Image (cartoon, helix red, strand yellow):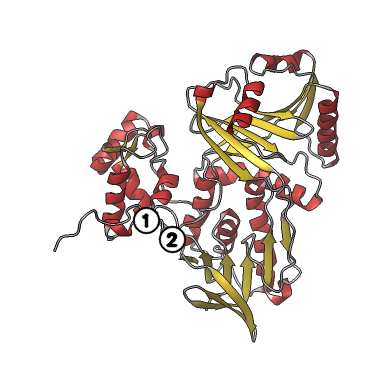
């Protein structure tokens, strides 16, 4: 029996769970995967938007509020955050019209962190771009943040304070109302609660208003090697009538180039656009290319059944990461009005310290090694990840239980060798720490075993 059940352990679900965990409530988060935020972007950096080009008033207000909250949230949890600013550039009359529309919409939405520029100031970007810019708009408050670190911080803090239980590997199947409570059945068990918050995009029950999602667009992500020099710290947006391209430097040192288009493209077409955008870009600069569906919808927050005890957060917005802190705060305010609860006076509103050898000074590293020699033993030589960091990622609150979970927390296997030099060692460490056989270690999701079995069995 719980007070609240949240379906979905992504950024939205974990941020809502965090806000509600500050109250004397018994909360469960049901997640079908074996870790939090598995289906979320695993990239090391995402854009924090300030509200430009959003036509829906509710979503705009959430983006604006979330953007204003993000810096303090990141500072509290020690999540990497950097205010970079962004520049939208146009090179012909049609693109200038698009740029003027973005500027006017931003002004109508009372966004004041914007500056228009043209001529010589626009030409400043010609040294890094293959086109000549005629006009631009500068958004001063655009930033970047590490999305997985943000999600993990929300989840760990909620879990560490004892107010939230995580049910991993459980998929919600049915919900029915029994007297004054909901009964939710998963593939493993049954749970009851008077309040259900459903944050899973494609999971609908009879109370939900289904929303058609515009999937007729694609996002193509090109990650360069760290040796590639973008030439600016700002996020660069290039406007076209049929697509949008942006590029920026990530926390890890790569450049991330994103192409959003209604066209289905192959690798050569994707690279061709990159060649036409950046002067210094070469084929050998590419490290990885990914393709995702691009959702153009606004996020739907359905609170029509709040008196019944049910809330649905549906859809996926391009600024979901920016929206999350504000959305969680707003849903928390709605929920506590319907429940008899009080703020906890013993709440520890901080995340347990994390260790990242790559960002520490020599003195800090030496002091850490004195406490635990494992922090002096490199396991992943590409990303300089130590045995101590891997063990900490497994033992800490909501510790990793899969290879992918360790990768997202530490960066292992994301270097040039893609784990060929360290995967076996990491598998051994995870098996030892979780008291499992090597053949039971999971890479990411159900049945994705690292090893399929022994080569030869002995009596």
Looking at the image, residue 343 sits to the left or right of residue 408; the answer is: right
Instruction: Residue 219: name its quadrant.
Output: top right
Quickly name the residue at label 2: 446
Report x, y in % for residue 441.
33, 56
Q: Is residue 84 visible?
A: no
Is residue 73 depicted above or below 303 in this figure? above
Q: Do the residues labelled 1 and 2 touch (CB within 8 Å)?
A: no
Q: Which of 291 and 38 is in front in this view?
A: 291
Which secondary structure, mark 1? loop
Instruction: Residue 34: name its quadrant.
Output: bottom left
Looking at the image, residue 429 sits to the left or right of residue 212; the answer is: left
Residue at (78% x, 21% y) in the render:
91
Residue at (57% x, 62% y) in the render:
8
Q: Is residue 441 visible?
A: yes
Q: Residues within 10 Å of mark 2 (few under 14, many from 20)?
A: few
Report x, y in % for residue 137.
77, 27
As drawn, the residue found furthest toward the left would be 459
Which secondary structure, mark 2? loop
Is residue 330 depicted above or below 382 in this figure? below
- Return the mark for residue 141: none
Is residue 180 depicted above or below 119 in this figure? below
Q: Residues within 10 Å of mark 1 (few under 14, many from 20)?
A: some
Report x, y in % for residue 432.
26, 55
Q: Which of 412 and 6 is in front in this view?
A: 412
- Return the mark for residue 449: 1
The CA span between labels 1 and 2 is 8 Å
Looking at the image, residue 249 sits to the left or right of residue 51; the answer is: left
Q: Nearer the viewer, residue 209 or 192?
A: 209
Q: Which of 197 and 241 is in front in this view?
A: 241
Report x, y in % for residue 305.
73, 72
């Amino acid at each position: 029996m719980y007070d609240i059940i949240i379906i979905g352990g992504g950024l939205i679900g974990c941020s809502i769970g965090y806000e509600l965990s500050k109250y004397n409530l018994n909360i469960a988060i049901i997640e079908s995967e074996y870790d939090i935020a598995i289906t979320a972007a695993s990239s090391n950096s995402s854009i924090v938007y300030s509200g430009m080009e959003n036509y829906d008033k509710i979503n705009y207000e959430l983006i604006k509020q979330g953007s204003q909250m993000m810096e303090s949230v990141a500072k509290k949890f020690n999540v990497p955050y950097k205010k970079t600013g962004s520049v939208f550039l146009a090179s012909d009359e049609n693109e200038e019209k698009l740029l003027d529309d973005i500027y006017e919409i931003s002004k109508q939405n009372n966004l004041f962190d914007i500056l228009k520029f043209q001529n010589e100031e626009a030409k400043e970007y010609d040294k890094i771009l293959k086109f000549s810019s005629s006009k631009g708009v500068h958004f001063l408050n655009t930033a970047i943040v590490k999305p997985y670190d943000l999600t993990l911080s929300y989840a760990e803090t909620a879990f560490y304070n004892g107010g939230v239980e995580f049910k991993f590997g459980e998929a919600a199947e049915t919900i029915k109302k029994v007297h004054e409570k909901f009964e939710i059945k998963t593939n493993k068990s049954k749970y009851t609660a008077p309040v259900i918050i459903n944050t899973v995009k494609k999971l609908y029950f009879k109370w939900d208003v289904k929303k058609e999602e515009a999937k007729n667009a694609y996002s193509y992500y090109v990650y360069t090697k760290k040796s590639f020099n973008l030439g600016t710290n700002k996020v660069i947006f290039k406007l076209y009538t049929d697509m949008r391209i942006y590029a920026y430097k990530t926390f890890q040192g790569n450049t991330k180039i994103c192409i959003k288009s209604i066209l289905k493209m192959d690798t050569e077409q994707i690279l061709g656009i990159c060649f036409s955008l950046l002067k210094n870009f070469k084929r050998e600069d590419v490290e990885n290319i990914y393709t995702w569906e691009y959702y153009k919808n606004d996020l739907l927050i359905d609170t029509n059944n709040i008196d019944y005890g049910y809330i649905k957060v549906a859809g996926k917005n391009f600024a979901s990461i920016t929206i999350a802190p504000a959305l969680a705060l707003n849903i928390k305010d709605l929920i506590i009005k319907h429940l008899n609860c009080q703020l906890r006076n013993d709440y520890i509103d901080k995340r347990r310290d994390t260790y990242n050898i790559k960002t520490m000074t020599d003195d800090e590293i030496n002091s850490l090694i004195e406490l635990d020699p494992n922090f002096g033993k490199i396991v992943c030589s590409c990303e300089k990840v130590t045995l101590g960091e891997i063990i900490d990622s497994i033992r800490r609150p909501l510790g990793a239980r899969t290879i992918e979970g360790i990768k997202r927390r530490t960066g292992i296997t994301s270097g040039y060798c893609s784990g060929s030099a360290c995967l076996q060692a990491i598998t051994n460490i995870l098996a030892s720490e979780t008291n499992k056989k090597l053949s039971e270690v999971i890479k990411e999701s159900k049945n994705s075993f690292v090893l399929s079995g022994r080569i030869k069995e002995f009596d």
